């Protein structure tokens, strides 16, 4: 009996532990191969060329990328599933990544947030492993590293680096696991997605806000953070402080269809939960922020944190009335499954803690 109980404990521990592959240094059969500077027939010297070569049908396709930096924006739009594998001798750790996709386009020149994305995902069932995705535009405008509009999209041990609006997690069900996400201003943002973040390092490179949820109605959209770290990026100036977030969408005033009729759409339904976060970057005393003075956008927000700890949390931390500290039972209701409406079979569970 005791022995059986012992084995059950061992079993449950091992099924919970991270279990990514030990290495991934060669392409699986059938993969399209990307290799910087290649002259081998059948290989592609850019990621963009490999994506363009995928058949636009319902088949599952894989792209394997050898180490290197690949410059230019790419939009994945084919209809079937796509898996992107970055070469790695340690696929569990983003810090060992050797593949970088980079561009430096801002929304000011691109015309929209989405159009500025270094990598844009506009199809469903996409999994990306061990790839760094960077927007090098820097301060001054929205400049998205990853613009994610797909359903069932998983990022596993990736690095997303930008400054303002690094990750547009806009639409669909997404997971971001064991990854690194860096920025200063509203750097995890979007409107409709159901996004789950676990085991990530969230790196703050300047004073601003981590999230800017733009949920605009009481829909299923949510950003749920569980067991992540918030750290200072190496580039952060001294005095840097951050908030968990501020609500993006607002009351919109506008003339609509009918002459002389002004419609008011109340759309401030931001929803973000931080559970069991270890914070070493200085967190503002009040943890959460209004949008702007006189345009607070807090009417219908759902904000909360639970078991926040670490040296970045002020001993005099306080929370606004619209962003309470959650009770353990309230926090327990926010799970991977609840965030994604029970739709979790598509997730690579090897990257869950
Ligand atoms: C693939 O086909 C779909 C459906 O016909 C279309 O909407 C999409 O633009 C196509 N994508 C590409 C990359 O051609």
Image (cartoon, rainbow, N blue to C red):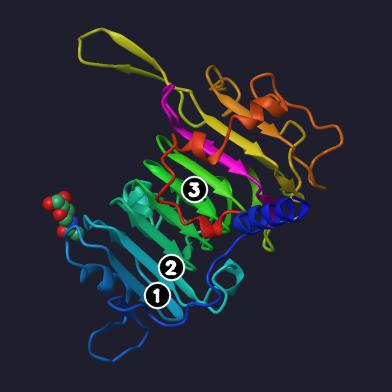
Q: Position of residue 154 (x, y in %)?
A: 44, 54
Q: Secondary structure at mark 3?
A: loop
Near mark 3 (Cα within 10 A), the count class, few <14, some 14-19 or many ≥20, is many
Whether residue 310 is visible, yes or no, is yes
Q: Position of residue 194 (x, y in %)?
A: 45, 38
Please tell me which residue lies in front, 275 or 115.
275
Which residue is rendered at x = 36% and y = 83% of the image? 35
Spatial CA span between label 1 and label 3: 21 Å
Mark 2 = which residue?
Answer: 102
Span shown in magenta? 209-232
User: For residue 317, which quarter of the picture?
Assistant: top right
Q: Secondary structure at mark 2?
A: strand
Q: Find residue 165 and name its label.
A: 3
Please tell me which residue lies in front, 203 or 96.
96
Spatial CA span between label 2 and label 3: 15 Å
Mark 1 = which residue?
Answer: 70
Which residue is rendered at x = 38% and y = 67% of the image? 84
Q: Earlier in the sequence, mark 2 or mark 3?
A: 2
State which image quarter holds ligand 1: bottom left
Do the residues bearing badges 2 and 1 touch, measured as CB atoms within 8 Å?
yes
Please determine whether, in this image, residue 323 is positioned above or below residue 239.
Answer: above
Near mark 1 (Cα within 10 A), the count class, few <14, some 14-19 or many ≥20, is many
Which residue is rendered at x = 68% and y = 33% of the image? 305
């Amino acid at each position: 009996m005791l022995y059986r109980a012992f084995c059950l404990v061992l079993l449950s521990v091992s099924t919970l532990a991270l279990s990514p592959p030990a290495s991934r240094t060669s392409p699986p059969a059938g993969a399209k191969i990307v290799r910087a500077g290649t002259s081998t027939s059948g290989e592609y010297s850019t990621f963009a060329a490999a994506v363009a070569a995928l058949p636009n049908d319902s088949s599952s396709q894989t792209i394997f990328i050898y180490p290197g930096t690949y410059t230019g924006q790419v939009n994945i739009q084919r209809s079937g599933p796509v898996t992107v594998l970055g070469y790695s001798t340690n696929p569990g750790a983003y810090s060992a990544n050797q593949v970088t996709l980079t561009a430096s386009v801002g929304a000011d020149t691109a015309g929209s947030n989405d159009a500025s994305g270094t990598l844009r995902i506009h199809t469903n069932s996409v999994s990306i492993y061990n790839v760094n995705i960077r927007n090098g535009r820097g301060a001054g405008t929205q400049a998205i590293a990853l613009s994610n509009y797909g359903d069932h999209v998983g990022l596993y041990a990736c690095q997303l680096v930008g400054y303002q609006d690094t990750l547009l997690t806009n639409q669909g069900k997404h997971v971001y696991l064991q990854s690194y996400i860096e920025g200063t201003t509203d750097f995890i943002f979007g409107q409709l997605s159901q996004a789950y973040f676990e085991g990530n390092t969230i790196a703050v490179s300047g004073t601003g806000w981590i999230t800017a949820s733009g949920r605009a109605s009481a829909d299923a959209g949510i950003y749920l953070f569980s067991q992540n770290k918030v750290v200072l990026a190496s580039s952060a100036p001294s005095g840097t402080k951050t908030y968990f977030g501020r609500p993006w969408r607002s009351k919109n005033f506008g003339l609509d269809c009918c002459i002389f009729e002004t419609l008011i759409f109340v759309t401030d339904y931001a929803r973000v939960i931080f559970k069991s976060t270890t914070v070493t970057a200085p967190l503002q005393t009040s943890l959460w922020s209004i949008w702007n003075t006189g345009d607070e956008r807090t009417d219908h927000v759902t904000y909360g944190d639970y078991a926040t700890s670490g040296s970045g949390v002020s001993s005099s931390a306080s929370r606004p009335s619209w962003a309470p500290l959650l009770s353990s039972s309230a926090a327990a209701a926010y799970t991977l499954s609840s965030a994604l409406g029970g739709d979790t079979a598509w997730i690579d569970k090897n990257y869950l803690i």
